[in-house]
Amino acid sequence: MVIGLEVHAQLKTSSKLFSSSPNQFGSEPNENVNFIDSGMPGMLPVLNYGCIEKAIKTGFALDFTINKYSVFERKNYFYPDLPQGYQISQFEFPILTEGFINIDADERQKKIRIERAHLEQDAGKSIHDIDPKYSFIDLNRVGTPLLEIVSYPDLSSADEVVNYMSSLRQILMYIDVCDGNMQEGSLRADVNLSVRKPGEDLGTRCEIKNLNSFKFIRQAIEYEFQRQIEILENGGTIEQNTMLFDTSSGETRAMRSKEFSHDYRYFPDPDLLPVNITQEQIDKIKPTLEELPHEKLERYINEFKIEKNISKIIISEKDNTKVFEKMISETDVSPKVIASWLVGDIFAYVKENNFEVLDLLDRTKLIMDLLKLVSEDVISNKAGKEILPKVLSGEGNPNELVKEMGLEQVSDTSELEKIIDEALVGEDENIAKFQGGSDRVLGYFVGKCLKASKGKGNPKLINKILIEKLQK
Amino acid sequence: MSDIDIKRISYLAKLKLPLEKETFYANSLKDIIKWVDNLKEIDTSDVKPLHNVTESTESIRADEIKKDNSVDDVLNNAPERANNFFKVPKVVE
């Protein structure tokens, strides 16, 4: 199967693409609508420079050619949630051309080429299910800035599409261009899918519109793939069509066929002049580009010596890296130790208790105090894990909790020696085994001593003293 | 000059033409296009396409929010309203 993706990313700006209305999700209906958005005659659109900046940042992050000259055109069609009667988009001269992303594909990296990315307006929302005869229109989303990112048909499986989409989402979130919230529609994909036998020319494609979750993308691809294969194997031909994905049945179906095919009659918008970006503007934006996910991954592995799989978990969400980087800035405990606590017990706690990762930000100081106690052997690793949930839920600070819970580790050598001496009484046979070269007996002795100390003995010290005594 | 598909054009423009007027409008449009086609006599092979006659650059604004009207101002122009929604005849794709 051959797949190309068109991804619509809502830009994280304060105001809309061509009007000063708030670009905000979840407001009361028609709260964020002015006369430009509602398509009143005579209103003139004025371009928001914030959108140009976000587009240029994306250009750097995805290795695009940033075009200094781009043109807004009108894409004409009628729909109630598009009051202008046309969408302002870029057609012949988009702001970005020829970029790429490297994605994971079967343990290897695969380069997915991106043909173009252009700025355009989002449409409003129609609600059809309140009244049998009427549609209700909310124009809040009208004019929200979108960057439409169009890949080449370089993708060849549902896995690759999901990897591409999640890499794209991750990058756009890292560079603060898009909030990546797919549930709210901040990031949506149109999937163009065709099938062919190896070596043959491209087949006829169908476009599945407006998929807003990874799950739906996967389901829609799998269903549409089977549908096309079945048609071809029964001797039929694929009709080029625009499909909708029914999220309840998991099936794709053709949109009600139109009397005439779409004819958008693009032409340069006479209300808007061509956009000229200067080299100075581009140069000014470049240093504001945040560290990209793959750069962070390399730094975590090389600079902090964190295992690759743990690094990958941390960088998978930008919020994780914010918490992690705050933690390492507050302590001298090694980043590697912090990382393993973070992706282990700390994330497990966050998940179980429906916390947001960012909720950890105001607890990092306390968590670091706890990890310091562990790394300095004041308490055992096991005791640390016992105290952690209490620290995370805000029940107290680690130093007090250690005392309250009586978990302080015994590191007093004379006390430990006493325990060890007692543990060795009557163990002549095992002592002989150790001296005969059996290491396994050592573990037995350490366990016995720990038990005798009620779990509070410092295992490293016990180990050290034991060996000294046994070798005598 | 290509022929005028008046049915398609009226469909795209969401205009309902009475059957007896179709020929009239098709001919009028043909005349207009014929007149504009006079421009084809000029050799423009060396001329770069122009996207706007002023040849100046788009004016831009900073990314700032300004609210200069209320919901009611906008909905005053609605054919019908229901609460804070525009209410229109049902259109389902």
Image (cartoon, coloured by chain):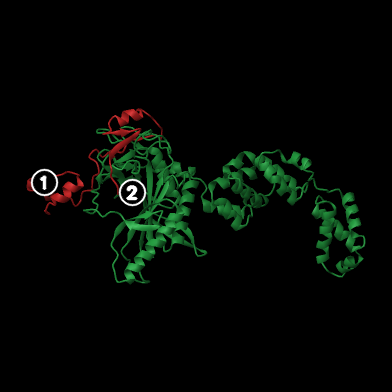
Chain colours: A green, B red
Quarter residue A86 falls in: top left
Query: Which mark is on residue B29?
Result: 1
Query: Which mark is on residue A94?
Result: 2
Quarter residue A156 falls in: bottom left
* Residue found at x 57% / y 47%: A320
Mark 2 residue type: Pro
Q: In this image, A235 relative to B43: left or right?
A: right
Q: Dot 1, crowdedness within 10 Å: few (<14), some or many (≥20)?
A: some
Q: In this image, A201 relative to A369: left or right?
A: left
Residue A101 locus on image (x, y percent)? 45, 56
Query: Which mark is on residue B12?
Result: none
Q: In this image, A440 relative to A192: left or right?
A: right
Marks 1, 2 in one chain: no
* Residue found at x 48% / y 59%: A103
* Residue found at x 50% / y 65%: A106
| Quadrant, the N terminus of chain A | bottom left
Is mark 1 in CB contact (under 8 Å) with mark 2?
no
Q: Of residues A314 and A456, which is closer to you in this image? A: A456
